[in-house]
Image: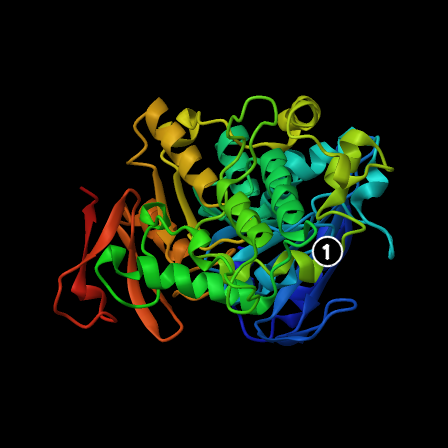
Amino acid sequence: MLLAVLTLPGSGIAVAEDCARLKTMSGVTSAEVVHGGSFTPQGGKAIDDLPEFCRVTATLNPSGDSSIKIEVWLPVTTWNQRLEGTGNGGLAGHIGYGPLADGLKDGYAVANTDMGLGVPDGKDAGIYVGHPERWADWGWRSTHEMTVFAKSVVKMFYGRAEKKDYFVGCSTGGEQALMEAQRFPDDYDGIVGGAPAHNRTGVHESILWNFAALEAPGSSLSADKLTLVNQAVVKACDMNDGVKDGLIGDPRSCRFDPAVLLCKDGKSEQCLTPSQVEAVNKTYAGPKDSRNGRQLYPGLERGSEFAWGWLPSRFSIAKAPFAPVFEWVFGADWAWQSFDYGNDVDTMQAKLSGTLNATDPNLDLFMKHGHKLVLYHGWADQIVPPGETITYFNAAAARAPIDGSVRLFMLPGVQHCSGGQGPSTIAPLDAVVNWVEKGKAPEALTATGNGMVRIVCAYPAEPKYNGQGDINNPTSYVCSMKK
């Protein structure tokens, strides 16, 4: 078999021939062996310490208006007989080489896609106004197409199918994860979805809401002011979980009111103006329907303020964050200042939700066939409010028993996907592999980073400190339900 040939010394010629043979597959644009050591993506930085692999690039056209770029990397001698599909971020439009390299180093045959939203230099996804097939590619089709294609490549290269299939993604990748579980429940045996932007229309309306609140005249908060708020929040709520460590275990129990920082006696430093207090409260509150006050999407949690500076640092007043998604609905001349959280929300939902949103709580087929889903979200996420992931988890649990198939882990102090003030390094793929292949459901994960070691428990359980052990020793905590 081919696998045996690939592990034999001196088989370089055979490997090159077997890799090149993949060029005969429909859609393949190149197939060549990359010798171990380093690979440099076009226009990118070198990626080092890679094993030898067969690199396959392809362009798929499932619709007349599609152009989905895909790469599959196949380890030559280190294959663990698994396939890993990987997710993207933001509006995608490019191959994610970091996830490809990480998966390859761990022995996986690994795939990634640009999600069909590639754009010429100097342009953005606004060029796809009036191109609903491109919206569908980005929303759901590209990830499935990538998966089917990658499975075919694996079978042709190794001479047999992989034993297990996994998907890992965060943010947009988390949306891809849930879209796969809902629409294509047999694509993967195990799925990891981090900080999922699965309510896609909602998350963009939420980001715009926060942008408008924090950029309103007189409301802008400097980095020092954001630090001021964050320190006050942590001081007020740090001990809510029984451990003084600079982290808020569950921000929903925090009742901090930014009005305590209101400036007095004409002062303007180390305090907030009335407009700034209003902006902070509006960001906590999240978007509401302008017609009836109905909650449209959760707000950002208390304790995430240290990361709010990403909005003014990445986007200007001239053009709103992720404007192309709104332009697809309202046209290329859309102005963000005119957006109404009433009729315009209805219009967004009507035009895009069926294509972009992965909010269906029906996971019946996914669970029936024994597949496993691990979700995680940082409590201090500054981009995708964690409350929406909890809403989805609760909706799925209310519909059917999910404990044997789905786990959610909430990470204190962690911002979007990783980083922040809390420990954000976890191993969710290892957890889902053990669950799928060994039947060991993850009740807790170990999180490390920032000099901390903690456990994060399967929601709704929370870590409970025993009151006397080292707070950086995971054995000092047990997972328990909040009373």
Q: How is the image coloured?
A: rainbow
* Residue 119 in the image, given as x and y percentages of width and height: 82, 49
Q: Which amino acid is tagged 1?
A: Phe
Residue 426 appearing in the image:
no
Q: Residue at x 50, y 61 (%)?
A: 264
Residue 389 appearing in the image:
yes
Q: Residue at x 28, y 60 (%)?
A: 455
Count of numbered circles in the view: 1
The quadrant of the image that shows the C terminus is top left
* Residue 177 in the image, given as x and y percentages of width and height: 52, 42
Secondary-structure class at tag 1: loop
Determine the image quadrant of residue 427: bottom left
- The front one of 238 and 158 is 238
Instruction: Identify the residue at the far front of this view.
Output: 265
- The front one of 225 and 264 is 264
Q: Is residue 293 above or below residue 180?
A: above
Q: Is residue 235 above or below residue 92?
A: below
* Residue 170 in the image, given as x and y percentages of width and height: 53, 51
Q: Residue at x 22, y 69 (%)?
A: 471
Q: Could you classify mark 1 by the number of other residues whose Cα lies within 10 Å: few (under 14), some (14-19), or many (20 or more)?
A: few
* Residue 314 in the image, given as x and y percentages of width and height: 70, 59
Determine the image quadrant of residue 334: top right
Q: Residue at x 70, y 73 (%)?
A: 45
Q: Is residue 6 above or below residue 204?
A: below
Q: Is residue 438 left or right of residue 34?
A: left
Q: Which residue is under mark 1?
A: 315
Determine the image quadrant of residue 239: bottom left
- The front one of 193 and 391 is 391
